[in-house]
Amino acid sequence: MSETPVVIEQHGHAPFLQHHFHTAEQQADASKIGMWLFLVTEVLLFGGLFVGFAVMQSMHPEAFFAAHHHLDRTLGLINTLVLLVSSYTMVMAVDSARRGKQRALMIYLLLTLMFAAVFLGIKYIEYSHKFHEGLLPGKYYSHAGDTVPGQFMFFSFYFMMTGLHGIHIVLGMAAITWLCFRARRGDFSPAYYTPVDMVGLYWHLVDIIWIYLFPLLYLIQ
Amino acid sequence: MRDWLRSILLPAEGTSYAGSVDSLFFFLFYMGVFFFLLIAGLLTYFLIRYRRRGPDDRTPYIVKNHKLEVVWTLIPLSLVIFIFFWGFHTYMDAAVSPGDAMEIRVTARKWVWEFEYPNGIRSLNELHVPLNKPVKLLMTSEDVIHSFYVPTFRIKQDVLPNTYTQLWFTAKEPGMHRLFCAEYCGTSHSDMLGRIFVDDEKTYNEWLETGGDEGKDMPLAEFGAMLFKSRGCNTCHTIDGTRGEGPSFRGVFGSQVKLQDGSTVLADENYIRESILRPQAKIVAGYQPIMPTFEGMLREREINALVEFIKAQR
Amino acid sequence: MADVMALKPGVGGQAAPNYLTASRGLKSWLFTLDHKRIGVMYLASVLAAFLIGGVFAMLIRMELLTPGPTLMSAEAYNKAFTLHGVVMIFLFIIPSIPAALGNFALPLMLGAKDVAFPRLNLASYWLYLAGALMGVVAMVSGGIDTGWTFYTPYSSSTGGAVSLMTLAAFVLGFSSIFTGINFIATIHKLRAPGMTWFRMPLFAWSMYATAIIQILATPVIGITLLLLVMERVFNVGIFDPKLGGDPVLFQHFFWFYSHPAVYIMILPGMAVISEVIPCFSKKPIFGYKAVAYSSVAIALVSFLVWGHHMYVSGQTPVASAIFSFLTFLVAIPSAVKVFNWLATMYRGSISFQAPMLYAIAFLLLFAIGGLTGIVLGTLSVDVHLHDTYFVVAHFHYVMMGGTVIAFLAGLHYWWPKMFGRMYSEKWARISAALVFVGFNLTFFAQFLVGSRGMPRRYYNYLEEFQPLHIVSTVGSWVLAAGFFLMAGYLYASLRKPIDAPANPWGATGLEWQTSSPPSVHNFDHVPVVTTEAYAYATETEETTVGAR
């Protein structure tokens, strides 16, 4: 952090500058700090599930290995690619906002939204397949013909982890929709696009979590 | 001095291990008293010596002294490192059991302790051990987490479901020692108590032979009253008519008991016997099927005594 | 003290509207973005929670007056101690100093107009309200009897409103996280011109350390409690030994948060003491950097000591040894703080107003709490003391003798700033004496009950422990009398017209440079900082106490 005193600029109040900040830069920096801290809490929230998964997998390696065969690797891989592409479009949206390209911003936001919807669609196909086969968490597990017992535990984690991730995707879609409305209203400019930047960071985190979830759940060795 | 302090601060020492824990405890105690008096003494002195005398008081600019900071960091640091190694040393004594220890199995469940001895004898809430011989407990729980705690031995170990944990001790004080459940386990947690009887070799062996034929000279009902307490029936059943986890024994004998499935049954001797040995067979309406089975855990005379005792609760 | 107040006669802002009078009506409060109002709402809420938790505490003490049933059944007792713990921890102590006093004071102390994210701040308060509401619903719809530690498999198998209560704690966790995020961003970005990191009041350093823990530890308890709810609803198996899970894993998860969480509770207490002692000794703090860095050290090491709650849980002896060693290390920064506070008083000009009385009480009680912590950190001794009343007594010496007493110090210190009224100093002293005596009666007896071998969470106990329990219960009545007295004179002060000067204590912090109560925007002009914190005496000139 810089130790120099903040220069108080008395330029006319920009509409986006909140009263308790002196400069737009100060406001943007504060938002970035806040967002990064929030992302840290998200990592730790998922971290608990990852640790739980690791411990249970080490206790029941055969069951976890047997259970993961029920997952469709192709669909998982497609979804990974879809999210990666959506991260790219999100980067482009932030870049467009920074350059003041309103139309491109809108297009990239809508593209991101679309890829997110595709992800959820594929997830829906996967989920309904699991429901159909009785591959459900905990006491609702009713898959017939298992040779290795205890596979319900894997699906407990599969649904908790992908479910929590799915909720994050939905929240991200809501945030992107909100950005679309604000972008249409012309709120963003090269001087102020912090919300786009912040939602972008969030979206990358959601993407990264999936990058970890995919091999963890689909590619057990 | 130490004995006097111990009588205030700690329970009696039932093992020589307890003595080594207490040595450390007293070191910590004296150290704590020293530091508390140091802090409180300095504080009191400053408060009196430097109390405000008026608005003309001047205070000096004293804001740092690196030597002092180093000193009051390093002294406590070396002290606690010393304490750590001492504590670790005694802890390892308790963690590693001697190879020749006699093994007793402990099963904990809400809210009784069951012990099984090498010769197959079982006892409830009463552990008999020989004097001056190492005893190892191999423990597991049937439901939630419990904790096996004997204050006079200074030992404690959580008892987990689906896992074995162990403890060992060599009792050196004959007589009765108290056993507590130290991990909260529900309604009757504070009644999940047991007694440990430390006897000389001969008395212990006699007890093992006869399977602890206690109360053999007692009338049945009186023996039953004793078992009612020692076997932990009283954690769930009352004899004064108030409702516990299980039905009260008052007036139950000879009455028509309403069961969970809507039917009624006459509470005769056979019903009571069955309810003790296979409690899940007939569940009284309005109660949960939580009573553990006592099949194989009571000898014939003990069952008779309990039936007699319940019969007497009119 | 009359002479101090006479120095600066009434400069309270009766004429200009202050933050309390600027707007009226319930809506102007519930939707306010003003950190001061949010702080006041938090204050009212945590005090209400303290009352509820206190009622449970009194019921527990009444029940323990005699062995066996005294006034309630074992089930009711188990619910009472659980609710006492849950309410006091999640609804009172954790938000008490940071969210109530800190929210009010921190931006003022930094010379800022508000916290970095006012809307997030309000969201934090609403989440608190929502969590509290869920907690109350859980209380009346069956209650819970798991203990505030929610250990599995008991908590996953018992009846009652466990799921709702854990969800409430989950929501409250996010409220706490939001406060933490806000404070870190505020401290980084909203310090007044000239306020470098090492010119900040130590309160801000401690809040920063607290916020680090709130952010890094709270999500873990969040996911843990969610897993517990999943266990109850779906039997997912992770904590259930019957399904192949590991109940001890829950304890690891739980203490990974809950041990750092006790530092979420005590660091803010230390923060207040670091303000009060220099002010009422009229001397700069001794060892500023040592106190500041020790807060951060506590925050970091606190993450590595959770296993000291589990020496007898069946974890390996090696793990226990490592945790024991680290536990001792975390004790050192606390000791360093105490010595620095003492050194601050050396050659000071000490006055005995209510905040200082509480700070003195803090030093004595926290010393006992800390030293008994060393006893509990020692492996073999802890095996005997674990889960006995000794732990209960230690915990209350640190949390109540430490944090709650410090909270009271802060409350009395900033009360004139918050509400513009001086309370009765005489009654405040009597109340402080009652609280101090009552507290020691209540909890010192519990050290003895515990070291003699009485386990905690016991409804029924051996008769040999009764005399000490009687002392403890009588102590709780004295304690309660002290609190009722306090409620009385604080309420009475609010009925008076505004009479507090801007700086009743002659303190140096920026919060004392604005009117009492402050205006909506805190400062008329952005303050510029040119000196170190606590410039009660400076290197170049010796000024008299009265000149300030």
Image (tube, coloured by chain):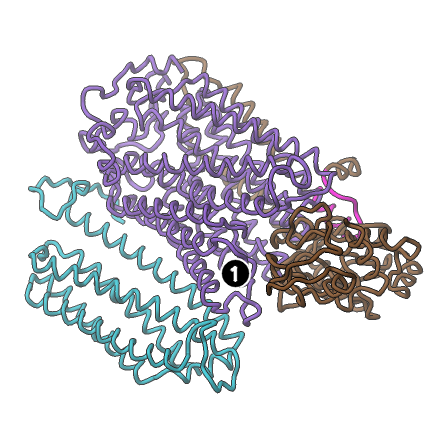
Q: Is residue B18 magenta?
A: yes
The reply to whether the magenta stretch includes residue C436 is no
Chain with cyan colouring: A
Q: At 53% across and 39% down in the image, what residue appears?
A: C398
Give the residue at mark 1. C156
Q: Main secondary structure of the magenta part?
A: helix
- Residue B32 visible from this viewpoint: no
At a point 38% along the width and 61% down the height, the residue shown is A45
Q: Is residue C117 left or right of residue C86?
A: left
Q: Where in the figure is residue B182, as x and y percent of width and height? A: 65, 52
**Is B50 located above or below residue B165 in the figure?**
above
The amino acid beneath tag 1 is: Ser
Q: Quadrant of the N terminus of chain C?
A: top left
Q: Position of residue B125 (x, y in %)?
A: 76, 56
Q: Which residues are magenta?
A: B9-26
The residue lying toward the viewer, choosing from B6 and B233, is B233
Left or right of C240? Residue C445 is: right
Which chain is the one coloured brown? B
Q: Colour of chain C?
A: purple
Residue C244, horizontal then vertical, whole percent: 55, 72
